Image (tube, coloured by chain):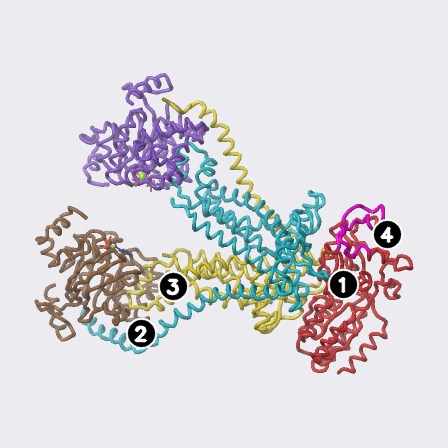
Chain colours: A brown, B red, C yellow, D cyan, E purple
């Protein structure tokens, strides 16, 4: 796994990346981010650098602001009325919270997978080509290619290749979730945000998605919110522990789980609350 | 009989007719028959009453206006003011029929004076016993055509002598309403065009009228001979000259009406004119073309 | 220590149960009464009108002779009316619903529109007739045309369509919208490609119900002054016309029994049309119901 | 696979980038649509304004010829007689008589049906009967008018002595039947919305179903029920064809229900089917009557909305 | 209050009581009870004798049939369409499943308290007098007495005595639940059924209700369903452990929790499943 990372890092040095002190490319750099739902101060002075082609897990008890944070990364949070933010989130150097940054552009680069599988009530094929089509790709051949590639990428090609025109609602929950992942892959984003993508799935489907995440990180930067600490430990490179809207600790996953530096992290991980 | 108007050539266009509800049954029959010879001509027939018909006629919204009384001077004046020339055609005779409910077994006849007395508003509640002693002491329910109708105008002139009609009369431009009203009401008293009585003979009882020469019932004969006086009267249609000239379909329809007027007015329950009256009308029409 | 005398409680049990049974029977009877009336009404109309119902009845123009009279002009007129009302009312109704559900902010103005719509839904249809008479027939000089009547009817059924469409749009889950936005879709793209397809069964159902309302209405058309006797078919939307309820009204108001039977036959045609439309609505609802 | 992907990756995102040129068009639509949609939403507001202005304007024309005092206070309505008498009260009286009869018929039957459907009927029965009842509300009113005139009236005349062919009773009853499903359906909704825990709580105390309904469910659903009744009354007031066909056309100011009457709506129909000679006093009078009718129903509708909003139960 | 109890017991000895072999009075004797929801066999051959003036707890994992059983005891189960039963439940000797047994009569003797507090949307006073009133008690003085006694009995008199005419919805969840208990007491039942009465309550309210149950058992036989094993251990005399619609074990609470005779009981109690 580590070899992949180093290779990628080298390649990417030529692009418009910013590196952290250790020389890794930073996709998202969050600085002094604050967020309010009306009067409810949901995120407090968040500082967080997300490294490219890594899996970053966000953990924390319910209501600590995990979903809020991840939704801020592609500005889906704007759908909630009355949300205010301060601070900045630099995506490849540019502050996405700046209103001059068009959200549509941002979201073509940052895909998202949700807690409950939410395919469109359309055929499997139409689900996948939805993104490319809205971005103006009409060529049937290219679309077909995209569909195959995305479904393969989401490790569900074999299961659905013979029923492309069936409604996605006929699939099981786990399959639906992988369709949703494939749908996100179809526009080839740089980053994929996942908000508890397995919490509505059975253990076997969960396993499949976890394996998929491992596979995907070769090509994508992944930020995943999870309630399941074992999952975070299994699949992530870095882990951020949120509590009451603050980042309590952010470090290598190994370190967080074996040797957390904050007492509250330790309490949470050992199940003393949450 | 339809051959005359057909000429073999198919006409197109639109003809609008409105006016007397008394004449309506004739016009309805005419238009229906006409539709079979000239299906492409779109004819609409309204029945707003004679007065209402003239209003739209004056406004230029219709080509033909039917009437159960001759056009009034003020209506003529308005047409002249607008520069509209028109022609009057007689179409049939009508015996304005006074009717009561089938179950009314006391009325044998009414004199013109009695009619006048009972239909005029005098501030009292009218009872049958007010007309003649021995008749039921029950309130009379009056049914009359609306004030925009030629029938009302005629009644107003001949019977009421322009004095107000009883206030609680049910007034309706729709003669069917009147028929239904009298049919359903034992103490009802109403009047309307002969055709509406003829069509509903089994449900209504017509009252013979004594105009001074003994009671007379309206029938084809008594109306044609004018024996049924004073309530016999002619029915008319009025046509805009320019429409006859410029719209062949209007000309054609009027021609058809006059040619078939005798037969169709008899069919719907009116009394036809003398044949020479129709001939005369057709001559006049040719003159307009 | 006991405040409650158990034996009296038991004693009172019987009458209470009796009252319960009695009322249950009453409530049931009341419910059945509605059904009974419906049955009687349908039976009456069927038995009265069946005699006149024939293929010719659908094909014939109106006539003063009951045996020859038909509903062709009225039936075709009704279809013309639908052709005008459907697109206009759907366009404005669905547009309004999208605006209210997707764009409108929660403010006084939006609230005003909402209150306005629910009030409009309660305005008697005859008042719409007065509006149509003044605005469409007279001011815009459309006369008693298909267009004038169609516009009047569209306004009349607008609230029905708006409310049904709002309902349909509201049931489209938020997650579908989020999924679309997360792909970089714009709001309008999301509405057109995700919300509308999912909401369309509900909208269509509402639309059909609104249309059935429109073709059953008489009062506004009477006020507009549609002609009593019409022996031709409209060719454009600017032609005058008549519709089934008007024809039925015309026949109803004649005193002769034969015309009443004709009216009943006309009612059967109208009801068959309505049943047909409503079955389509039910079909749509069943076919597409609850897929998420 | 990873390699191939990298090649393509550039292509798709760059294709998207290329297409971005067209984005300005998208952005234009994005800005335009809400405005267009707002305009469609304005149509309903315009409709209301249209109604109000039409009525007000033409009503003013009417009050130019007939004093508003006469309109409101005179006790007779004889627009067709020569000197004309324009007191709205007989028309209002006719309207109220018919509506009252309708309510007397519809409220008990509608409520009883609602109670049966919501409290006694099984789920299956309810799902069968409710739509059938709602069919009653969807039948065109001209059909009801015909039914009233040719069926209900003749039957009533056998029973009620002195009942005239046109009367208030028959259309009143038939309107009652027409609005019954409205009361039944809306009240049933209100009663079904009362949580089951409430029923269980009462039943567990040994209450019979009837007692639960009367003492717990009805009070809890009261606002919805009252609102449904008010709405139904508004419907009855505005109902036209049934009274036009079966009610007659004799405006009078008394409380008799056996004789011919005229309602506000039936008057408008009478003038419209006869001659609405444009510009005459009679022509304008239908707007004045329409205005009165509009105000009546508006007040009822507002009242219904107010009731259901203000007294919404919090369980 | 204890005096009342002993008096009552004496009184009741004369009535139609049945005793178990140890000489205790049996309130409910369930024999070979089977229950189906349609095809779902929810209760299987239940045999259970409930002793008077004891607290009997029913525990078991979710879906095991606890609620179903307790609802059968006052035939509230009949509200569910398509329920079929076989076997018998004798309440003081008479089979209540017999259709000739009027449910209304049964329910005047068997009160019930539900999981979620469900006071009527009426005043506190009206809530309490609802039962007595429907049973024909109209005398204002008696009603007042009943209200005071029931509210005292439910240990909430002091909290509400000054606001009798306020809507019961203004009270906190715990207070509402005690109002519901008072409402059940007002018709002076013999038995009180409680289906997870504290699961919607906060810890402090829970404690209050638990204390109350201890108090109530002096006068009433109490059957309580609970998810909370500690609660069962704390307050009950006997405990029945349900699993998949069967009674696995029914014994003294002490025995169940210290020395269960069935392996599955032990597994459940020690948290190995459920
Ligand atoms: N739409 C909203 N409006 C107002 N407050 C909200 C909204 N969404 C979340 N919050 C509040 O913001 C805080 C953080 O919520 P968030 O959903 O981010 O938590 P979370 O960590 O994702 O929790 P969970 O694990 O339950 O998903 C909570 O206090 C929550 O109540
Ligand atoms: N109304 C119903 N219709 C059909 N099946 C039901 C119904 N209620 C319960 N069941 C089924 O009966 C079984 C027993 O349910 P019950 O509610 O008695 O369980 P429980 O032990 O009370 O569970 P919990 O602790 O979750 O309340 C379950 O399998 C449940 O799915
Ligand atoms: Mg979350
Ligand atoms: Mg339970
Ligand atoms: O309709 P009229 O013939 O009476 O004018």
Residue D234: x and y, percent? 54, 53
Find the residue positioned furthest to the right.
B213
Q: Is residue B121 magenta?
A: yes
| Residue underneath mark 2 | A137
Q: Is mark 3 within 8 Å of ligand 1?
A: no
Return the chain for callout 1.
B
Distance in Å between CA atoms under marks 3 and 1 = 59 Å
| Residue underneath mark 1 | B152
Q: Is residue E50 magenta?
A: no
Distance in Å between CA atoms under marks 1 and 4 = 24 Å
Distance in Å between CA atoms under marks 3 and 4 = 75 Å
Few, some or many residues within 10 Å of mark 1 (<14, 14–19, 20+): many
From what the image shows, is residue A176 above or below residue B93?
above
Q: Secondary structure at mark 3?
A: loop
Residue B70 shows in this picture: yes
The magenta-colored residue range is B117-142
Q: Is mark 1 within 8 Å of ligand 5?
A: yes
User: Which mark is on residue B108?
Assistant: 4
Residue E20 shows in this picture: no
């Amino acid at each position: 796994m580590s070899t992949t990372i180093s290779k990628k890092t080298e390649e990417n040095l030529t692009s418009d990346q910013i590196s952290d002190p250790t020389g890794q490319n930073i996709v998202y750099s969050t600085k002094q981010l604050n967020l309010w739902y009306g009067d409810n101060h949901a995120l407090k002075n968040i500082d967080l650098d997300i490294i490219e082609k890594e899996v970053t897990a966000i953990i924390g008890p319910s209501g600590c602001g995990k979903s809020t944070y991840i939704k801020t990364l592609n500005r889906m949070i704007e759908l909630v009325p009355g949300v205010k933010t301060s601070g900045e989130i630099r995506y490849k150097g540019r502050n996405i919270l700046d209103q001059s940054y068009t959200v549509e552009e941002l979201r073509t680069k940052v895909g998202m997978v949700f807690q409950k599988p939410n395919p469109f009530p359309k055929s499997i094929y139409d689900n996948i080509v939805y993104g490319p089509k809205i971005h103006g790709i009409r060529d049937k051949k290219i679309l077909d290619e995209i569909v195959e590639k995305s479904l393969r990428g989401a490790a569900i090609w074999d299961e659905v290749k013979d029923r492309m025109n069936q409604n996605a609602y006929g699939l099981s929950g786990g399959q639906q979730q992988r369709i949703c992942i494939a749908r996100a892959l179809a526009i080839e984003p740089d980053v994929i945000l996942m908000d508890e993508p397995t919490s509505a799935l059975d253990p076997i489907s969960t396993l499949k998605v976890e394996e998929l995440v491992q596979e995907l990180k070769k090509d994508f930067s992944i930020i995943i919110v999870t309630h399941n600490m074992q999952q975070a430990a299994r699949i992530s490179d870095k882990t951020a522990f949120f509590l009451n809207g603050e980042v309590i600790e952010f470090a290598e996953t190994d370190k967080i789980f074996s040797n957390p530096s904050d007492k509250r992290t330790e309490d949470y991980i050992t199940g003393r609350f949450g | 009989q339809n051959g005359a108007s057909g000429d073999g050539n198919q006409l197109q266009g639109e003809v609008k007719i409105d006016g007397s509800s008394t004449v309506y049954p004739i016009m309805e029959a005419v238009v229906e028959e006409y539709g079979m010879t000239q299906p492409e001509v779109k004819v609409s027939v309204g029945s707003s009453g004679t007065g209402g018909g003239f209003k739209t006629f004056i406004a230029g919204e219709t080509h033909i206006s039917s009437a159960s009384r001759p056009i009034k001077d003020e209506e003529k004046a308005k047409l002249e003011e607008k520069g509209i020339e028109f022609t009057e055609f007689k179409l049939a005779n009508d015996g304005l029929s006074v009717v009561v409910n089938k179950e009314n077994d006391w009325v044998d006849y009414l004199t013109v004076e009695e009619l006048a007395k009972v239909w005029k508003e005098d501030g009292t509640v009218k009872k049958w016993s007010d007309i003649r002693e021995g008749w039921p002491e029950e309130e009379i329910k009056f049914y009359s055509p609306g004030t925009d109708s030629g029938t009302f105008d005629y009644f107003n002139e001949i019977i009421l002598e322009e004095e107000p009609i009883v206030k609680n009369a049910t007034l309706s431009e729709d003669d069917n309403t009147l028929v239904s009203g009298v049919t359903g009401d034992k103490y009802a008293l109403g009047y309307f065009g002969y055709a509406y009585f003829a069509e509903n003979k089994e449900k209504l009882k017509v009252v013979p009228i004594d105009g001074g020469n003994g009671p007379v019932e309206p029938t084809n004969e008594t109306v044609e001979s004018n024996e049924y006086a004073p309530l016999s009267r002619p029915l008319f249609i009025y046509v805009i000259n320019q429409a006859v000239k410029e719209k062949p379909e209007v000309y054609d329809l009027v021609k058809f009406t006059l040619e078939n007027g005798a037969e169709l007015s008899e069919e719907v329950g009116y009394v036809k004119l003398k044949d020479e009256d129709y001939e005369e009308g057709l001559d006049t029409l040719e003159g307009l073309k | 220590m006991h405040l409650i005398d158990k034996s009296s409680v038991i004693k009172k049990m019987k009458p209470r149960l009796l009252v319960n049974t009695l009322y249950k029977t009453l409530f049931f009877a009341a419910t059945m009464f509605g059904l009974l009336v419906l049955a009687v009404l349908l039976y009456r109309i069927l038995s009265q009108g069946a005699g006149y119902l024939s293929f010719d009845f659908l094909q014939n123009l109106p006539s003063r002779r009951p045996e020859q009279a038909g509903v062709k002009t009225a039936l075709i007129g009704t279809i013309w009316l639908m052709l005008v009302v459907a697109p206009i009312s759907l366009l404005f109704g669905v547009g309004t619903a999208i605006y209210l559900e997707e764009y409108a902010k929660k403010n006084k103005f939006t609230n005003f529109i909402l209150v306005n719509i629910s009030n409009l839904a309660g305005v008697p249809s005859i008042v719409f007739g007065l509006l149509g008479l003044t605005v469409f027939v007279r001011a815009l000089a459309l006369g008693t045309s298909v267009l004038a009547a169609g516009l009047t009817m569209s306004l009349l059924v607008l609230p029905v369509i708006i409310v049904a469409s709002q309902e349909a749009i509201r049931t489209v889950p938020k997650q579908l919208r989020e999924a679309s936005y997360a792909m970089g879709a714009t709001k309008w793209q999301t509405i057109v490609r995700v919300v509308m397809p999912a909401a369309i069964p509900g909208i269509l159902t509402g639309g059909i119900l609104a249309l059935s309302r429109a073709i059953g209405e008489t009062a506004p058309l009477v006020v507009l002054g549609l002609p009593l006797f019409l022996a031709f078919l409209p060719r454009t939307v600017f032609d005058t016309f008549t519709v089934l309820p008007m024809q039925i009204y015309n026949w109803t108001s004649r005193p002769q029994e034969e015309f009443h039977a004709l009216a009943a036959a006309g009612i059967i045609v109208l009801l068959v049309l309505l049943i047909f439309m409503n079955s389509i609505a039910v079909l749509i609802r069943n076919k597409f119901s609850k897929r998420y | 696979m990873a390699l191939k992907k990298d090649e393509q990756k550039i292509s798709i995102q760059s294709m998207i980038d290329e297409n971005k040129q067209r984005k300005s068009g998208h952005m234009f639509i994005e800005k335009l649509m809400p405005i267009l949609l707002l305009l469609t939403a304005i149509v309903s507001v315009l409709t209301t304004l249209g109604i109000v202005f039409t009525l007000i304007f033409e009503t003013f024309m009417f009050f130019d010829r007939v004093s508003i005092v006469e309109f409101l206070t005179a006790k007779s309505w004889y627009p067709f007689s020569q000197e004309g008498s324009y007191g709205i009260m007989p028309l209002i009286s006719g309207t109220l008589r018919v509506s009252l009869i309708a309510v007397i018929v519809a409220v008990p039957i509608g409520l009883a049906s609602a109670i049966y459907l919501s409290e006694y009927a099984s789920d299956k029965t309810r799902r069968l009967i409710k739509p059938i009842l709602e069919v009653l509300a969807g039948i065109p009113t001209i059909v009801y008018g015909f039914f009233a005139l040719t069926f209900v009236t003749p039957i009533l005349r056998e029973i009620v002595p002195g009942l005239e062919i046109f009367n208030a009773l028959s259309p009143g009853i038939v309107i009652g039947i027409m609005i019954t499903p409205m009361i039944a359906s809306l009240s049933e909704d209100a009663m079904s919305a009362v949580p089951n825990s409430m029923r269980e709580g009462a039943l567990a105390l040994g209450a019979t179903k009837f007692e639960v309904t009367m003492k717990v469910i009805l009070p809890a659903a009261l606002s919805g029920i009252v609102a449904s009744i008010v709405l139904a009354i508004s419907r009855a007031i505005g109902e036209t064809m049934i009274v036009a066909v079966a009610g007659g056309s004799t405006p009078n100011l008394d409380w008799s229900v056996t004789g011919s009457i005229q309602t506000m709506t039936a008057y408008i129909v009478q003038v419209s089917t006869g001659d609405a000679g444009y510009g005459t006093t009679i022509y304008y009078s239908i707007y004045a009557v329409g205005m009165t009718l509009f105000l009546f129903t508006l007040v009822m509708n507002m009242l219904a909305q107010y009731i259901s909003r203000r007294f919404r139960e919090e369980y």
